[in-house]
Amino acid sequence: MEGGCLPNRGLRHAVDWKRMDHTIAQHECGNGITLLGDLMEGRPVASFCIAIPAGYVTEPEDRLGVTGLLAGMMMRQTRRRAPRELSNSLESLGLHRGEAVRSETVQFSGALPASELASALRLYAEILRAPLFEPEELESERALAMQALASLNDRPARKVMVELRRALITSAHGRSPLGVEETVSRISCADLEREYGRRFQPHGALIAVAGAFDWGVLVGLVEELFGDWQGVPPRPAPVEIRRQEYAQMLVQETAQQQIAVGYPSVGLVHPQFYPLRLGAAVLSGGMSSRLFTEVRERRGVVYSVHASLVTLPGEGVMLCYAGTTPQRALETEAVLKAELLRMREGITEAELERARTGILSSLMMDQESSLARTGRMVADMRSLGRVRSLTEVYECYRRLSVADVNAALEAHPAGPFTTVQIGPEQDGSGPGAEVEQ
Amino acid sequence: MEGGCLPNRGLRHAVDWKRMDHTIAQHECGNGITLLGDLMEGRPVASFCIAIPAGYVTEPEDRLGVTGLLAGMMMRQTRRRAPRELSNSLESLGLHRGEAVRSETVQFSGALPASELASALRLYAEILRAPLFEPEELESERALAMQALASLNDRPARKVMVELRRALITSAHGRSPLGVEETVSRISCADLEREYGRRFQPHGALIAVAGAFDWGVLVGLVEELFGDWQGVPPRPAPVEIRRQEYAQMLVQETAQQQIAVGYPSVGLVHPQFYPLRLGAAVLSGGMSSRLFTEVRERRGVVYSVHASLVTLPGEGVMLCYAGTTPQRALETEAVLKAELLRMREGITEAELERARTGILSSLMMDQESSLARTGRMVADMRSLGRVRSLTEVYECYRRLSVADVNAALEAHPAGPFTTVQIGPEQDGSGPGAEVEQ
């Protein structure tokens, strides 16, 4: 531990990234499943993330929401285990689990005592390969899905971001994983059977494990459980992003005006991803970021404001949010967009150093959690086809100068804006007025 | 990693808790500050939690919400650092920070690269001991506080729990940390000065650090930074819990009916805390818990339902939530309360094993995060005056039989119920109707 001076030297010299780094083990099964292992010796915990390439982008138009129902139904019972029996088996392992329906994958994640990892993977092989869809369970799962859709109306800050994605991302990647009431209400067990058979296939699936395990035993177990599973899922259509100005106003009797603004950016594969990611951190990376100091703290117009660079397969978008009083909606929208546009004028050396420190610090924090490590492995494999080492990520940020970042910000200015708002009806701020910038 | 059988043996034999355990270092400063250290060697990260005994329970009745404003103002500037300067200094350390206003403490937490821990503690000494309250910054902070209050109306699921606490916990511990609009609107800089001087005092404060550090250096630094700080804060009044039936209906045009039910339980110091905590986990500890299977999965009436045993100084309460459609509100309330009451009839051996496995598994997961470890140290010190070892917690749960748990559940049946609901007005379900059970 060092003394008391406060040099603004960032993390570039303070941490030995090479020493923190570690090798990710990788094994390819013959059927297109990739197994990844991040060994954390001495931990009593193991985490896993199984990513099946069955995301909502390949849902049929008239069965939107079927993937979420499928994932929910798969966790209820299998051909060998009745509803109560399956959940009891999972809980007896001390498993903390979660399922996430993403655009191109469905992810089954869990964390548990390392000694129970093999038992958990055996259960997940059954869940993934031997599901059973019964009408009574479907009605219960459907009721939950309909409630999830309804509850979005009581979460307007979340709803506005769902609607922004839908408006900005014009390919199927912009859909909501929840589907829509009209289609969710008519999904049958036959639909589940068909969609499971068509889309839950092993080719391109990932199994990422972090924590304490024996790699040789793990490879043998995964081959035993999943090695003879065969099939190729449908290929998703490419991502499409709206590249013209667009505005939408949804009237609802909310207390706050919910403002969401999005525009095209770049994906992880783009050569200017790292400088633009740093730019996004200058904009909204913490309490000294521009949106926080200019919009939230200095003007006090909004309680919550944030922006983030969200990556999609091969692409990226900036998604921004501000919540304010209906009276200050126009002012807030103008201030927010002005800050977004001002990024093209460039950032300062001090802003770059703080943003870089924040990103590298987050990278370091994420290393504490075995579950976060599995998520990072899956995200890298999906975007890049390989897992970046910590040293590589560190180097990608370390070598960037202010000039590099500013060149990227000038080449990728904010806009054209897609704007979605939710709020009470107001004089002179109807849909027509909102289109003006 | 073991083979494929799935014995329901729980965590009792699988993990060597003694080997996982570790010693918490402790140092008492002469002024009543206690320093706690949990060394995690080889980690590049350190986390801290500084708990000042200045929680909202000692706020004056006519200045409710002043503690949140104080904490916000303290993070804005100090007598030595202007607003931008302070946030820049904090961010330059790669610090991830958060402030929490609790009933009896205000907690300043952070996680950062271990090499920057000393610099961070120096800044926090300045924040805690040399704050500066200026009118312009106060107006900005107040605007945010008013927005936070307003945004609660757009989060009815959160609002109903705030109102439940207020109704069930009749002492000042039931207050909302946000205060109320009437008092927040009139707080002045003079109020901040007075409340800071009266309540932000070192006697009884805790500084918990986890991660990589040198204990000798840390003790010396804390003595240097905080050793000459003197003062004793006002003593909080004891907790009081409502012990008669009570019902309240708040009409709001929400999509879902928000139902909150609470009743008295016991605190961490009570001899039956551990069996009742296990009972609460049987009720609502995961996907095979009673509320999840009976209310959510089997009947499909609610999207979200949960209950938890919340500890307060010397006391405890059960807080339960269900969100459903307005049409199914009466049914849901009845089903929820029936499950709560049914606990007094006892649990099964299998339920006990699953609940115990879940609790011990969570305890193990929390060990991954240095920040979670600081929170656990502070919670134990506040409740018990000492930090329990992992082995002690493990033993407290391990030794309990079904008979022990059932005796505790019979001695502490659910009720009398305090019920708060938020939802649209309905025929025959106004406040009068809601009082009937």
Image (cartoon, coloured by chain):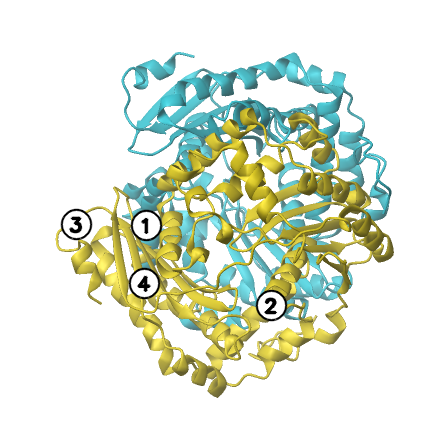
Chain colours: A yellow, B cyan
Residue linked to disc 3? A426
- Image coordinates of residue A237 in percent, x first then y, are 49, 61
Image quarter of the C terminus of chain B: top left
What crowding class fits label 1: few (fewer than 14 Cα within 10 Å), some (14-19), or many (20 or more)? Answer: many
Label 1 and label 4 in one chain: no
Which residue is at the far bottom?
Answer: A403
Identify the residue at horizontal 33%, vertical 14% (top origin).
B433
**Parent chain of label 1:** B
Residue linked to disc 4? A418
Identify which amino acid the numbered label 1 is placed on. Gln
* Callout 1–callout 4 Cβ contact below 8 Å: no
Viewer-side label of 1, 2: 2
Tag 3's secondary structure? loop
Q: CA distance from mark 2 to mark 4?
A: 32 Å
Residue A217 appears in the picture as rendered: yes
Identify which amino acid the numbered label 4 is placed on. Thr
Viewer-side label of 1, 4: 4
- Image coordinates of residue B279 in percent, x first then y, are 65, 24
* Callout 3–callout 2 Cβ contact below 8 Å: no
Tag 4's secondary structure? strand
